[in-house]
Image: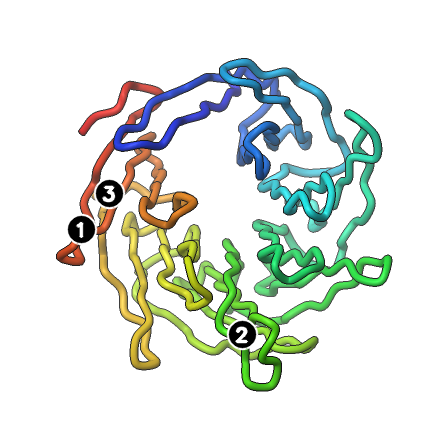
Amino acid sequence: YMGVSLSATTKMVSTLASIDTGHEDMIHDAQLDYYGRRLATCSSDRTIKLYDVVGNTHTLVAQLKRHKGPVWEVAWAHPKFGNILASCSYDQTVVIWKETSMGTWEPVHEHTAHKSSVNTIAWAPHECDVPILACGSSDGSFSIVTYEDGKWTSVVKEHAHTTSVTSVSWTLSSPSPSSPTTPTRLLATGGCDNQIRIWRFEGRGLPDAEHTLGGHADWVRDVAWAPTLGLAPAAIASCSQDGHVFVWTFAQNTWTYQDIYHTSGHPVWRVSWSVSGGILAVSASDNKVTLWKESLDGKWYCVSSVEDGDQAQK
């Protein structure tokens, strides 16, 4: 059975709908668009499927085929840039798709700068005014793909990690003195070298790592900046093959972490913040999704848990 579940996030988590996607192999990612009306899924069967989602119903509207290997992730661009979807694959490529007419999707750019599997992708915040996509690869590099002046261009940061780059996540920081009206882009990357690195982008060039965060004892599987109400980055969540979930905070030019969750030997695959940043969702190889919230005393508590489609537990 190759399906996905859509969940509602409140004080409790429960399954709203289960979708039999018809994928012929393992599903690696499922992403709703900005409005929550379209769902994209991708699979080891080398395909991407798009669904219209209305309430508890879903309708398959497109199936995208171009990759020559398993498709690891999909990512929707902000709708201000049009209906654009990116996908990355074991075949070393990133494909950017655009809906050219209702229900018709075409590949508008194929990014082929990497020498190994492209494991992860993320669009920069829409405040950057142009579409900017970060891509992380098993060749140890990340690349930045930008659409500007009618064309797609890319640059590659070699040796970003000593081994594979597994995850990328963007946020915006306060504008720099040299460009007081433009927020600074910050990129966090996680790798199989057990490290998280933070890169500050100012201008067109590729930066060196501004901070390197060590603490995990095994591969970093995912990193995610917490949404911020202002322009100062608040926190980063990370999870690892070592079964730990950390929340990192920045003070006095130093990053420190709080170990909020340990799964007792089960790798943790993904971390994801709610829109307001108040709730952190964690998914692990034990088939559980847990929701975490920080209390007034600064400690993190599990506020809900659901296992393999069961009803929520408190």
- Residue lying furthest right: 150
Name the side, left or right, on which 259 lies relative to 185.
left
Q: Can you give x and y, in whole percent of width and height, for residue 36 in the image? A: 55, 31
Cα–Cα gap, marks 1 and 2: 30 Å
Residue at numbered disc 3: 263
Residue sitting at the far bottom: 178
Q: Amino acid at mark 2?
A: Arg
Q: Is residue 130 left or right of residue 162?
A: right
Return the residue at label 1: 295
Q: Position of residue 27 (x, y in %)?
A: 54, 29
- At 42% from the left and 51% from the top, the residue drawn is 221
What crowding class fits label 2: few (fewer than 14 Cα within 10 Å), some (14-19), or many (20 or more)? some
Instruction: Please state which of residues 205 and 183 is positioned toward the viewer in this rendering.
Output: 183
Q: Point out residue 197 in the picture as x, y percentages from the top left corner.
A: 46, 69
The answer for how far apart the CA atoms under marks 2 and 3 are is: 32 Å
Q: Nearer the viewer, residue 67 or 248?
A: 248
**Rendering quarter of residue 205:** bottom right
